[in-house]
Amino acid sequence: MSDVFIVGIGIHPFGRTDNRSGLQQGEFAVRAALADADLDWADMQFAFGGSDASGKADTLVTQLGQTTIPFVNVLNGCATGGAALFGAYSAIKSQEFELGIALGFDKHPRGAFDPKPVDWGLPEWYGEAGMMVTTQFFAIKLRRYMELYGITPLALARVAEKAYYNGARAPHAWRRAPVDIDTILNSSMVNDPLTKFMFCSPSEGGVALVLAGEKKARELARADVRLKAVAMRSRPPGSFEVFAPAMEIDRGPSTTMIASKAAFEMAGIGPHDIDVAQLQDTESGAEIMHMAENGFCADGQQEAWLADGRSRLDGTLPINTDGGCLACGEPIGASGLRQVYENVVQLRGAGGARQVPRKARTAYSHVYGAPGVSAVVILEC
Amino acid sequence: MRLMCGRERSSGRLAFPPPNDPESFDPAELPKHGYLWSFTVQRIAPKSPPYRGTLPFAPFAIGYVELPGALIIETRLAGLDFGNLHIGMPLELTALPLYTDADGTMVLTYAFRPQRTAGS
């Protein structure tokens, strides 16, 4: 079976763009990806696209061209971008198509997300009692993890400090100024043990990736960045996920662990073979927990990893090289595709001030969303 | 005061909140005592709607309580200083005033507080 390649990438800068809608940021990213691939919209045989809160991706055909291609809209919470890529990858892998595009965009109002209980199959009282708050989940999961594995608030601050350091070097990032450890630790507490600077914020942005089958990629002379694995999983029994009024006492693996394992099996490589990684960092602790859930270290080793700078740009496994969600914010539909965009940039050696110094040949990305969806992508060049 | 869940007839599996599905689930009572599984403090008022707490907003503790032999359930935590919260602390079921309805009715929610009585 032929492999799938990423032959074009495009991004609309993340953050706030007052005069441009979410859809327009998606369109911007599509045009950038097509230009990068030296292709036209008319060359696309299909599209998978999504936004959580900023309109229907398929309406973009009005601007891009009514070429009558199948255009599938995707909606999978924070994993929407990962799901769009999963769809596009599968369409080419099946050999039904040889050239298509995955895109995602969003434009969220300022402040925390505003989910409604009924949309999540939950009773009204769940929201009335103050439980419909995503940040609580991350803090509660993290508190237990810290107690079990000896992770300290200093480690949380180190993750955030690294994110803003990297974001300052990434043109598409939102937060472009470094923030020091003390400022992070002493900023206002949002959900103990997480302070303001340890959380990402909803933001705006768009990303598009042009995918091609192996034959087509060779014709285009773009057969360099190969999709070795795209694995997406929903939550298993016994996992602890966002918006869970109850869970089983017998704990099981997380959706991330399952998606990660599947991706490594598809790729035929292991965590030690990865040169650069983008991991879902909704907050500092999420990056720490996801380091272990994705198999890069054992539970508890993150404290030493961070103290030694192993996940910094010049470390043994650079993580979130563009500052991740902490520095880029989280436009839900675009976030998972931003990770893959950043990995392609790193594999091409085009990262400029944030380029990892060691030649990267493999890159890993992991996006996680409510109510327990994970998508993992492994690239190789 | 009792906190109810649903027990699936076919599997014995417990579900909370109890599903509105009398064909498949029997009502069952959850234990009144348990242990704090994990927690946080909500320092900023959740968005309203859906949140309906008394005003002005005061930070509240929230977490999960492990109810032995049953489930780990999400719950508001009442009657404690935030500084005393610790994983594993014994808790007991209580009621917590949440808000006063338009017709003057006080609406309560279930909550857990530090155990005051001998454990069961």
Image: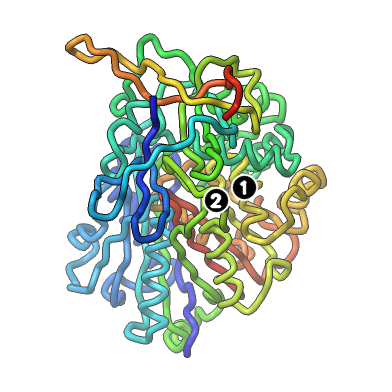
Residue beneath disc 2: A280
Quadrant containing the N terminus of chain B in the rendered view: top left
Q: Is residue B87 above or below residue A122?
A: above
Instruction: Assess whether mark 2 and mark 1 are in contact (beta carbons under 8 angstroms).
Output: yes
Residue type at the position of mark 1:
Glu
Q: Which secondary structure lies at badge 1? A: helix
Residue beneath disc 1: A287
Residue type at the position of mark 2:
Gln
Q: Position of residue A284 (x, y in %)?
A: 61, 40
Q: Is residue A228 above or below residue B13?
A: below
Q: Position of residue A129 (x, y in %)?
A: 37, 26
Nearer-N-terminus badge (1/2):
2
Q: Residue at x 57, y 58 (%)?
A: A253
Q: Which secondary structure lies at badge 2? A: loop
What's the chain of the residue with tag 1?
A
Viewer-proximal residue, B93 or A346? B93
Residue A317 occupies quadrant: bottom right
Q: Is residue A203 left or right of residue B108?
A: right
Which of the colour schemes (rainbow, by chain, secondary structure, one colour) is used? rainbow
Q: Residue at x 50, y 19 (%)?
A: B78
